[in-house]
Image: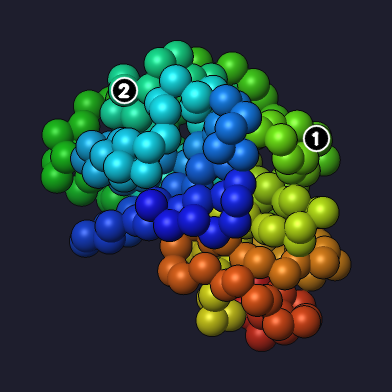
Amino acid sequence: MVEITESVSLVPGQDEMIPDSHIYLLGRPDSGDLSLVDAGLVGKGKYKIRSLLDADVKLTDIKRIIMTHTHLDHIGCLRELMEQIPSPELWVHAAEAELLEQGDERTVYGMDMFKQMCQSQYGLKNGAFTFKVDRWLEDEEELNIGGETWTVLHLPGHSAGGIGLYNERKGILIPGDVVYADNAIGRFDLHGASGSQLHDSLVRLAALRTTMLLPGHNRVVKAVPEGYVLQTAKQWAPYLR
């Protein structure tokens, strides 16, 4: 596990044929009120739990798992984590929370061909990603967790219920798969995705004072150049119509 700030740490994803998302641990270590952001790919639960334990994180202090969105590379090992962490709550944006509770896995897999491939590769059955969601998140909610305040930003485009978490005081942005380092953005050809909505989400993020970018994949940017997200939005605008 890599410490980003006193109250944010990273367990890097371990990519295979399919990417494995990073997970972030939020909360001051002495708060007893920690949160995980995202879970990761199928089969990665053991690695991520071991990373937390090796960093002396008490699993009993992890009170919730917050999903930036529910694509397979982010939610695949959620059940593995929930079997090891004592009774964590699951927080998901309302647009995808409803689908999880209904067992509608279109957002998880994105497209039928990918679903068939993943079910074959990982031995997954229909309904494997049916979950009760404890909190349906909404845009602009303020989450006072672990001694810090994070604002929920609904950022559709990569997925219908995608969110970012923004710490205004510190300028820290966790955008899920909306924007990465190196002017990269998330794909917009999956179920519930929209190029025009993704463009609007990028423009929204460009208005924030962001000093640190903690994306779902790729490298962390600890000193975000001024105008970086707007530059990225402009670069991709011709393709996001």
Farthest right residue in view? 207
Residue located at (29% from left, 50% from top) = 114
Q: Position of residue 106 (x, y in %)?
A: 44, 38
Residue located at (38% from left, 22% from top) = 85
Q: Image quadrant for the C terminus?
A: bottom right
Which element is circle 1 on? loop
Label 2, label 1: how far apart the Cα atoms are:
28 Å
How is the protein colored in the picture? rainbow
Which element is circle 2 on? helix
Q: Earlier in the sequence, mark 2 or mark 1?
A: 2
Above or below, 146 against 230 in this view is above
Quadrant assignment, res 235 = bottom right
Above or below, 134 against 229 in this view is above
Disc 1: which residue: 141
Inspect this view and state whether residue 48 appears.
Answer: no
Disc 2: which residue: 84
